[in-house]
Every structure is written in C-alpha cells, then in structure tokens.
Amino acid sequence: MSEQFLYFLQQMFNGVTLGSTYALIAIGYTMVYGIIGMINFAHGEVYMIGSYVSFMIIAALMMMGIDTSWLLVAAGFVGAIVIASAYGWSIERVAYRPVRSSKRLIALISAIGMSIFLQNYVSLTEGSRDVALPSLFNGQWTVGSSDNFTATITTMQLVIWMVTFIAMLALTLFIRYSRMGRACRACAEDLKMASLLGINTDRVIALTFVIGAAMAAVAGVLLGQFYGVINPYIGFMAGMKAFTAAVLGGIGSIPGAMIGGADPRYRRSALFCLSQYGI
C-alpha cells in the first residue's frame, strides 16, 4: 500500500473514533432542542462529569485489587451514567424549567451560568490540573505499512466503535418502539398538542435531559480512556464540537446528530489524501 493511502486510512480510523463519540454528545443537544427549542449549553460539562465519575470508580476498584479491564470499564459506565443522568435531571429542574416560558436570552444565560458553575465546582473539588487515567486497553493491530508510515487500529478504537453502535441502536429502538419514546416524538412534533392529549410534557422534557446526559456520560468514559487525560475544562470544547455536529446534521434530528458527528479535522486530512488520487 502507498504511504498516502495508509495515511488516509489512519485518519479515517481516527475520524470515525472521535466522530462517533461526538455524535453521542450531540444527541443530547438535538433531543432537547427538538422538544423545547433551547440549547443546553451545560451539556458539555455533563460529559466532563461522566469522565471524572468513571475515573474515580475505576481507580477505587483497582485499589481494591480488581484488574479485569472489561469489569472496570463496565463499572465506570454504570456509575457515570447514573451520576450524569442525575445531573441532567437537576439541570432541567434548576436551570431550564423555571425559565422555560421566558425569553430565549434568559434561558441561554441560565444555561451558560450552569455550565460555569459545574466547571468551577469540579475544579474546586477535584483540582484544576490534568488527571491521568489508567490505560485499560493497550493492544493494537497493524492494518498496513510502508517504509515511512504504519496504519494501525487500537483495541480502544474497536471498543469505542462497538459501544457507540450499541448505544445508538438502543436509543433508536427506545425512541421508535417504547411508550416514552413515542411520547418524546409526539412532544417534538407539537408540545402543546401533546399536552392537550394527556402526555406529561414536563416528564418527557426531563427524560430527554436524562437520556442526553446518559449518552454524554458514555462518551465521557470512552474519550477519557482514549485520550488518557481529563481535566475540568474538557467539556467546553467537546460540547462545542458536538453542538457543531448537531447543527450540521440538522438540529432536532437524532439521525442527523449521529451522521453529523464526523470530525472535520480528520475529514480534511482524509480529503487531502483523496485529492492526491484526483478524486
């Protein structure tokens, strides 16, 4: 294989890895906007909290002598999802429900204030320095090599692809076939009419915040393991990238958020490699 093609493959692997996790975060933005027409700018901090919760659980279990990678990651997922979901529910109750009928600017200020509060809360309680996470999946496989470049796939990348696929499939089935999923779709279609038909819209709105927070927590666990370092400020940039993905895919559309997760940095690299072949 030529060096340019191998480089293209490597960037595609990296792009799918990061893009799929950003798509998980983007789902939270698009679900909330699809129902109440507001952007949850505190959503990135929920992703950050999920990373910290998984780190603390994994570190505690390792101190107890548990060293099975899959067990540690599973425990990290469960803990991060539970705590992040609680934060998502609290954000809706504290920052959004009181100002839902107010002007959009007030809701925006409330969301930004909640984002700053969560960021500084974690900074004060856990410290503002980078925290190194234990690496649980270290294997890698060579896809191809040339004289100057080798394309590889790591075990962590495969784990990310598998987990994001399962999470998105589970969400799709929930939205399409469950009773609460149908209620979510009804509220997204017409919130007032759904309320007139007897749907508890407050409960549905809270559920969308909880689902979005759970998806962000999954992304937090995965990207924390992928990068190996977390800090209280990782939520802002990840949130902005995920918000961009949601907008590119069509804000309010769950499939669009999934598709819009392609990371533009790696896409540019891949397109540059393709241009070398005249495509």
Image (tube, helix red, strand yellow):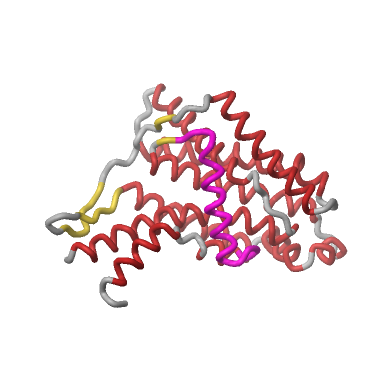
Q: Nearer the viewer, residue 241 or 28?
A: 241
**Split into 4 quadrants, where in the image is the C terminus?**
bottom left
Residue positioned 28% across, 77% down in the render: 278
The residue drawn where x is 52% and y is 62% is: 258
Q: Do we see residue 177 in this rendering?
A: no
Magenta segment: does it hold 252? yes
Q: Quadrant of residue 172?
A: bottom right
Q: Is residue 107 above or below residue 276?
A: above
Tell me the residue at 82%/44% (across/down): 98
Which image quarter is the N terminus in? bottom left
Q: Position of residue 252 (x, y in %)?
A: 65, 63
Boundaries of the magenta span = 230-253
Q: Residue furthest right?
A: 196
Picture coordinates of residue 77, whole percent (x, y): 49, 41
- Based on the picture, tell me whether residue 84 belongs to the magenta stretch: no
Q: Please give left or right for residue 13 compared with residue 92 in the image.
A: left
Considering the whole magenta stretch, tell me its main secondary structure: helix
Q: Quadrant of residue 37?
A: bottom right
Name the residue at 60% across, 36% down. 83
Residue farthest along the left direction in this orientation: 147
The picture places residue 23, in percent across and down from the top left corner, at 51, 57
